[in-house]
Image (tube, grey):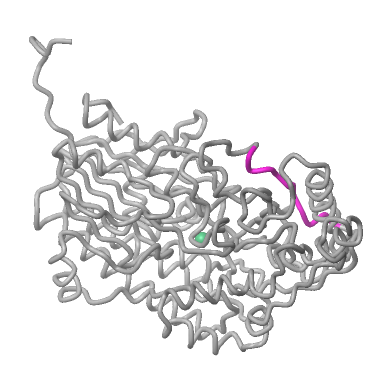
Amino acid sequence: MSAINKPEKSKPKIAMLGFDAAELSYIQEHLPMLPNFKRALSCGRLTRLSSPAQMFPGSVWPTFYTATPPGEHGIHHLMQWDADAMRLRRVSDSWIPCEPFWRELERRGLRVIALDVPMAFPPKECAGVEVSSWGAHDQVNLFTAYPREIKTEILRRFGEHPMGIEVPVDKSLSERMHVRKNLVSGVALKGEMARWLLTSRPWDFFIAVFGESHRGGHILWPDAPDGESSIPASALLDVYLALDNALGSILAAINLAETTVIIFALHGMGANLSQEHFVTPLMDRVNAKFGELEPGLFPAGHAPRQRSVMRLLRENIPPWLQSKIAPLVPQYVRDAVVDRQFTSGRDWPHTPGLSLRADNNGYIRFNLAGRERQGMLERGSASLARYSDLVRESFSSLRTVDGKRVVGDVYFSSEKFPGKRMGFLPDLIVTWDGLEPASRAESTLGTVVAEMDTGRGGNHRGVGFQIVLRPGSEQAGHEHLNEPLAITELAPMILRAFSDGGVI
Ligand SMILES: [Zn+2]
């Protein structure tokens, strides 16, 4: 193990440039207009990335930065079910602590700059530079920066990022065009900030993520199954043109002769084919049916009541008004509204399971005695098995009016993602069969009428990509024809590169 006779290795420099939920096929389709992505693809090595996004799109960033699957790190969404409090709650470091791998680099004495990595909790102490939730699509916390004085400097130089929060309601064309404008100007600001951070201080590892590709994909997807406001194809393209421009200016600020650059997206984007709007109304029927089938389980024998004032309000306040109100109220108030939408009016002894906040698939949580504070179904009981069967059969039975299957499959997350924190995950994941969102479906429990009303014309796809530019290399770009690389492999690859000069 002696280092004698070993040649001195030069210390690597690595820059990771993330384009959150950017879609490779969209980039490739528009390559003539995206000269910097084009150059990267022609000089670098392209590899597809596999991730848990097909099941839990909200888990990809913690999966990447902890190098563990969702059952181990426990994060699947920004707003998760807290079984002790019987409520939905924003994930936080104090509740579900997860440490990103670059803190280990800092402990080794390396100089780290991390800018807006989604779903990464800000540090309590930080030896490097870390900016969190300045311009992120999913804001896991309020804007924070280390060292502390840098926050003032950022606000002075760049101001607030114009992206703001996403209010999940239908949007008019003019509202979408306003989103486009904010994303385009936000990308330019983020690019400038990245350049400033890169050139104003020394670093060994740099990571910056553009959340605008994620928000833009959701709100501006051009093939959106959205009859009311057809979105001009130029809207999303404008965001990608801005991203390409920012990529070029960041690459120009990096000494490419001595730096490995990884351009990456952990998952992708496509037209929104989610049927998530059916989950809550169908779960109401499942619970009512279960009350009829197993009256002995329910105190006083009556069937579950599901009357949520918040749900009624949410469904009856016009979307434009919700869009106006939401950004004006503090984050904790918005979180309370989301929670009440799913939990208000719940009579827990009469609620064997509930739908959780989701983004594409359906998420269902059982109300288990001993796990949930007011749980009612016993673990391992015949009742739980019958309830689980009823949920799965009811969802599998969903058909469109012309008889097509709505649901792809219903999975147990404990089978897909076993691990020490799988108790933080939903119990069931409902996936869809690739149809455009329907507004009416037949089931064994009757007709369910519900509209997709999230304002999202685009939604997640499971496959991401990375383009690796090795120092000084102008290698002929070619796609790795091997299996996609799992996103859990990326952090170990970086750590190895810094510890023993491992090649990326
Ligand atoms: Zn998303």
Query: Is residue 406 highlighted in magenta?
Result: yes
Region in magenta: 404-414
Answer with left or right where residue 42 lies relative to residue 458.
left
- The image shows residue 4, relative to residue 200, as above or below, that is above
Residue at the spot x=42%, y=74% of the render? Answer: 331
Q: Residue 344 location, x and y as percent?
A: 64, 74
- The image shows residue 239, relative to residue 394, as above or below, that is below
Answer with left or right where residue 72 lies relative to residue 442.
left
- The image shows residue 175, relative to residue 102, as above or below, that is below
Picture quadrant of residue 273: bottom right
Picture quadrant of residue 444: bottom right
Q: Residue 417 location, x and y as percent?
A: 58, 39
> As rendered, which of 100 and 215 lies closer to the eye?
100
Answer with left or right where residue 331 lies relative to residue 497.
right
> As rendered, which of 46 and 119 lies closer to the eye?
119
Residue at the spot x=70%, y=64% of the render? Answer: 348
Q: Quadrant of the C terminus?
A: top left
Q: Residue 248 location, x and y as percent?
A: 26, 57
Picture quadrant of residue 256: top left
